[in-house]
Image: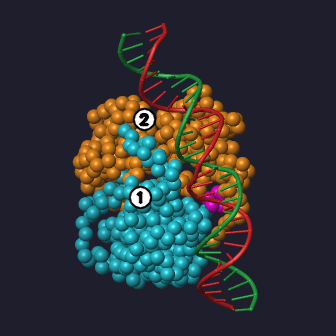
Chain colours: A orange, B cyan, C green, D red
Amino acid sequence: MAVAVSRLVRLPAIVVGINARSAVTFEQGIARAWLRKVETKGHVFTEGDPTTHVYRVETGAVALYKVLADGQRQIVGFAYPGDFIGLGAHGEHLMNAQAIKPTRLRCLPVATLRQLSARDPLIGFKLYEALARDLAATRDLVFTKGRRSPIERVAGFLLAFSRRNGENGHDRRCFDLPMTRTDIGDFLGLSVETVSRTFTNLRMHGLIELPCTNHVKLVDIEQLQSIADGEEGALWTKPMSLRRLACRRPRRG
Amino acid sequence: MAVAVSRLVRLPAIVVGINARSAVTFEQGIARAWLRKVETKGHVFTEGDPTTHVYRVETGAVALYKVLADGQRQIVGFAYPGDFIGLGAHGEHLMNAQAIKPTRLRCLPVATLRQLSARDPLIGFKLYEALARDLAATRDLVFTKGRRSPIERVAGFLLAFSRRNGENGHDRRCFDLPMTRTDIGDFLGLSVETVSRTFTNLRMHGLIELPCTNHVKLVDIEQLQSIADGEEGALWTKPMSLRRLACRRPRRG
DNA sequence: CGGAACATTGACCCATGTCAAGTGTCGTGG
DNA sequence: CCACGACACTTGACATGGGTCAATGTTCCG
């Protein structure tokens, strides 16, 4: 989940080459880049837009989503300050990027990026590694969407956000969720109501606190983790059906 | 982000430049590689194994899966002749690769591969393509696991197999499924029974034929496609609940 | 023949999506 | 300042889709 986003952070370093000199050049380039502001619900880009720039989120938050043929909205990830979006796009964007809070972004022309990458021969191998990382991240996303109960998904979501927050030097237990319950539902594949009920459920069990609807405090991270992992000690968290399943098919291969 | 990724794949083609000679070299290298045989249910490698080799499937089929903390098995993909497996793992394998039919594989030592790709850009490019295919497939799986009915998932699965078969010069409408119903269930996130019922359902509607349990003939590919896409004309395929949903939340942003 | 593995089908029921109603909370305009 | 609407969140009641259990059929192999 947040997995998907974190990998984006690293790409530019890879695309540009890993040596310190070009990294510096790259950071300087970003600092000079034009700053764009997008208000809540505004789009950074939409599916089909020509890919003129790559963006780095400075403040705010962005949801990356795709609308499926039947109108379903599938959010594929969220980008927070430090994350890059629109990277590597070639011709036109394949998804939509929508601000979920007032957001500021640095705009990097793709032509510049391409010039840099054409000069450094090491890039080929680094790209391979970048792809491998992407693949691993996307697979993680698949696992979160396996047959998992709402409480497992939400617990995993909160922990991913927590980890993310910790990596950025912020509080691991207390944070604001920038996205709405609907967004979380569209991300985890749940209805708004189920997301809401699950939050209530976690709160009732004393695992989290919700001073405001979008401010979360993780009270018992360990238990949340065991729920997210679907561990034996937390079986109550699963629908009965899956409980039995876990017993019947312990391991295979 | 999947965006970012699928695009990155193309960069090497730009940076690199393809010549016929190295292609020959690459194929020759593979042809000289040691041939390994794995019988049905044997493992090519398992999670945690050191990544000594990359493999290319010559004949047979391999399931790539991971066992989650609660014992759930999630198949993340199948590899057929021509596919590479073991790519992108660094140090040790992150998943299990199990033959689902008698299988022969070419074993390519990663050290050799790395040497070659340092000298010959085309090899790196080939590996990109392989990885990119993996990534695209995995990304599709993410969307498949959104809120989609069994019939949509199964229809999509059959069509993906069909497309794959066509690309390899085989029949697009008639083929053998090498995997069991359980495997399909673990791939699509459905129970065996539901998979079975869905096959029956499709057969009853005349969309497919099943001479043997694992031999499939696609009778009406177009209709299957519209089912897989969840298109309006095929709404009967969705649970009523999702039908309403599609109407209520047509598009957002 | 017998046993194992896989596939199919029916019956049941619970978890989750849907509908509906009520409760904040915010922003705008009078 | 309040009134109002828009929007997000919560909670309850209900329906149902798909997982589970159980029984049977089919294929394969020793």
Residue plotted at (59% across, 56% down): A147
Amino acid carrying label 1: it is Ala
Residue plotted at (42% across, 61% down): B227
Of A104 and D9, the residue lying toward us: D9
Q: Which residue is mark 2?
A: A100
Of B184 and A23, the residue lying toward us: B184
Total residue callouts: 2
In this rendering, the answer to whether B180 lies above or below B92 is below
Dot 2: few (<14), some (14–19), or many (≥20) neighbours within 10 Å?
A: many
Residue plotted at (31% across, 69% down): B122
Q: Which residue is mark 1?
A: B234
Quarter holding residue D4: top left
Indicate the position of residue B231 as horizontal and vertical percent values.
39, 56
Any magenta on residue B245? no
Q: Specify the principal SS of the magenta part.
A: loop
User: Which chain hosts label 1?
Assistant: B
Dot 1: few (<14), some (14–19), or many (≥20) neighbours within 10 Å?
A: some
Indicate the position of residue A185 as horizontal and vertical percent values.
51, 43
Indicate the position of residue A229 as horizontal and vertical percent values.
64, 51
Whether residue B221 is visible to the viewer of this picture, yes or no, is yes
Of B79 and A30, the residue lying toward us: B79
Label 2 element class: loop
Amino acid carrying label 2: it is Ile
Gap in Å between the C-alphas at discs 1 and 2?
Answer: 33 Å
In this rendering, the answer to whether B67 lies above or below D30 is above
Whether residue A208 is visible to the viewer of this picture, yes or no, is no
* Residues flagged by tags 1 and 2 on a common chain: no
Q: Which residues are magenta?
A: B68-72
Q: Is residue B15 left or right of residue A96?
A: left
Q: Is residue A213 left or right of residue A14?
A: right
Label 1 element class: helix
Of D30 and A12, the residue lying toward us: D30
